[in-house]
Each structure stands twice: as structure tokens, then as C-alpha cells.
Image (cartoon, grey):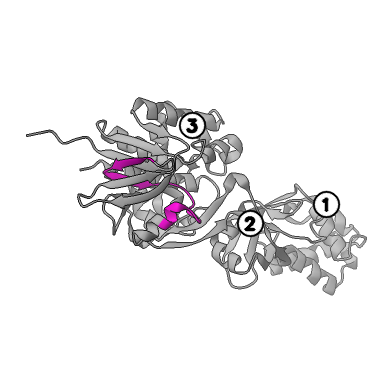
Amino acid sequence: MSEKPPKVVAVIGGGAAGFFAALTAAEADPEAKVTIYESGRRTLTKVKISGGGRCNVTHNCFEPRYLIRNYPRGNRELLGAFHRWQPSDTIQWFAERNVQIKAEPDGRMFPTTDDSQTIIDCFETNASRAGIQVRKNLGLDDLALDEEGRFSLELSDGSFAHADRVCIAAGSLKGSRIEKILVGFGHSVEPLAPSLFAFNIADKRTHGLSGISVKNARVKTTRKGSEQKGPILITHRGLSGPAILRLSAWEARQLQTENYHFDISINWLGDVSENQLRHQCNDLRASQGKTLIRNKSFFGLPRRLWERIIEICGIEDRSWSQLRKAQESKLIAELINAKFSVQGKTTNKEEFVTCGGVRLQEVNFKTMESRSVPGLYFAGECLDMDGVTGGFNFQAAWTTGRLAGMAMTSD
């Protein structure tokens, strides 16, 4: 009886998910012939620039039911997947390869070297050790399935390759050959939309205040939409920071339909209510009536922002005892219900993410295999799933890459 020939595995895309799928497959089955095909000149480009060049590997959250709350799309499908591979597994995987991961106070996790090259070197070293072939400047032009269930790959240089298993890990599919290939196989690709972007705002209330950050603000769209809490950063173009980026992610598709022209409401003081502020104003009238309003910033609000708000309210030269009820109401509105008109978006290149991709119902999230094309697998951003900023998108890449890599060499 002849021995079975080694499995041939083709991974399309040399990013985070592609490398992790390839490494998993090669390490699970050392006999397998694993090749990564990357259409660009470089691999792992997002890993290189993530976190300002430090690489935000994952997030310090080890309970899947809490972890999935950070995924506007894909949270339901990722719940089971995270029970199979989650941040603690990622940290251990890197530790076993002599890369230590540290947590920062906000939960983001980085290599202790604070250098994304550490992660790249780890992947490239272990890929070489596992015998993985990495072919750059070589994309996928077409894909066919023969009667025996093997794939024929037509590559961008006109050559052909064959594989028993194919993993699509090519990132965003917008307008690509791969999108057309998948549709040809009967898959549905959800429309793509940018996620994780800053808001462009031209408003005198923020003009000249670039660089000011408010730690615990709340922001929401004025129509019925999600509300997000966290730091908000005033920029020279408008507003950014974690709360803004999360709102852009959860509302990505709706904001696209509005052509990125919409209204938001901000509570600069986070959880502080109107009643609390009215009580504080009354207390200040009674106890510090002669004190100028500009000398007392509420709840640690940055002084320059506080001064701008009271200037807008026309009370910069008034004392607390001179504050009229109508002026008080305007002040409270500017503090906890400030309305801004957004007129466009600015993408943070380090965090560029798109929602949209292969419809999740068409993929088995236990194995990441296509439900309609046996032997075809998916990992990473090519799927209609995305996370907020903080290492969540990389964790989804590691998890889906791991599950795909294990399944491709399991039989």
C-alpha cells in the first residue's frame, strides 16, 4: 500500500491571518507543502505599522463573551471561535517562540520590545523553519476545482499551481479578482465600507484646540444609533480618539449611506447628568458666588476646552452669582449635549479596517471552511467581520487563521 502524498496547502495573502494559517498548517502537519502567495512586494505590512510601529498584538480580555462585545460585525460567529483560540492562547503561542507580550493599562497588548519587527521576525523565522514557501509579487488570478476535488490556481504571472486546500486570507476584497472568483463559486460578498475613522468637523468650538483629549466622554449620533464612551481627541480636522473610532465602527454602514454627513451629540463629562450639573451650579452660587466661572472647570475638563465652552455661552467674565438660569441651561447643554455636524471622515492609516466581505453564514466557524466549496477556507479581514481599535482585529486574524490552519491539515 502506497503512502499518501503530502497535502498541498495554498494560502492567498501574506498578512497576519495568512501567516498564522500557514504556520498553523505547517506545524500541525510537518509533511504538508505550504505556500503563501502575496500579490504585493511586502508581507505583513499591517503588522509593521500597527500601534505606531509597536504592533498591538491582541487585547487583555480572556472571556469570550466579553471579548465579542468589541466586534460590530461577526460577534456571534466569533463567540465559539474564541472558545477555541483566544488572547491567552495567542500570548502563549508567542511565548513558546520567545516573544513576550505585555499589557498596557487600557488593555492593549504589545511585544515587550515595543517593536512590530519582533512579531514579523517571529513569523518569518518560524515560517522558514517550517519549510513554508513565501512567494511575493504573485497574486491569484483564477481558481478552479477539478473532479477529484483539487484546486488549480492561475497566478498573476501566468503560471499555474495545484493545491488540496486553499485559504483565502487576502484582506479587503473590494473590486479584486478574488471577489469575482468567490462570487463565481457561489459565495456572497457583503458590500464594503470603511470602519475606524475620525470625524471631520468645522466648528468654532473646537478650532485651535487640536491635541486636547477628554478621557471619559460619551458620543452618539443624534438619530437613534449606538452610544460610545471613552477618550475623545480634538484634532485639527475635527474629532478622533477611541470613542469616535468605536462609533464609526458600529455605525459604519449607516454612516456610509449618509455620505458621512450626520450629526452627533457629545457629553464631555461622561456619566454626569443635567440634575447633577444644576445642583453643582446652585452649590457654586451659594459657596463661591464671587468666583469667576472661568476659574472653575467642571469634573476635570481640560481648561482650554472649558474656557472655549464658557466663551461660546457668553459667560467668560461672569461670576457664579451672576449666572442666569437661561445661561446655566446653555452651559449645561454645551457640557452634556453638545451638538456637532460631521462633514466627512479621515481614516487613520494605522487602523484602517473595512467592514464587509464574505457572508459569515456561508462559512463554518468551527473550521473556517466554506459551506459550499469543500477544501476552501477563509481567515481574517476577507470575512464580513471587524473589531474596534485595541488589538481586536489582529485577534480575529489569529483565531480564524488558527482554525483554518488546523482544519486544512486535519485529515
Q: Earlier in the sequence, mark 3 or mark 1?
A: 3
Q: Earlier in the sequence, mark 2 or mark 1?
A: 1
Q: Is residue 130 above or below residue 298?
A: above
Q: Residue furthest right?
A: 317
Which of the image's four quarters has the C terminus? top left
Q: Earlier in the sequence, mark 3 or mark 2?
A: 3
Q: Quadrant of residue 48?
A: top right
Is residue 125 shown in magenta? no
Q: Quadrant of residue 33?
A: top left
- Residue 264 picture location, percent across and down: 67, 66
Q: Dot 2: within a 10 Å radius of its alpha carbon, few (fewer than 14), some, or many (20 or more) residues?
A: many
Which of the image's four quarters has the N terminus? top left
Residue labelled with disc 1 = 208
Q: Dot 3: within a 10 Å radius of its alpha carbon, few (fewer than 14), some, or many (20 or more) residues?
A: some
Q: Is residue 317 above or below residue 164?
A: below
* Side of 136 relative to 302 (left or right): left
- Residue 161 picture location, percent across and down: 33, 40
| Residue in the picture at 46% in, 35% down | 136
Task: Work out whether residue 213 or residue 345 is closer to the camera in this orientation and state it.
Answer: 345
Whether residue 85 can be seen here: no
Whether residue 295 can be seen here: yes
Res. 244 mark: 2
Secondary structure at numbered mark 2? helix
Secondary structure at numbered mark 3? helix
Find the distance from the CA under tag 3 to the CA under tag 2. 30 Å
Residue labelled with disc 3 = 120
The magenta stretch is 159-180
| Residue in the picture at 34% in, 59% down | 185
Task: Work out whether residue 376 or residue 69 is closer to the camera in this orientation and state it.
Answer: 376
| Residue in the picture at 38% in, 26% down | 128
* Side of 145 relative to 173 (left or right): left
| Circle 2: residue type | Ile
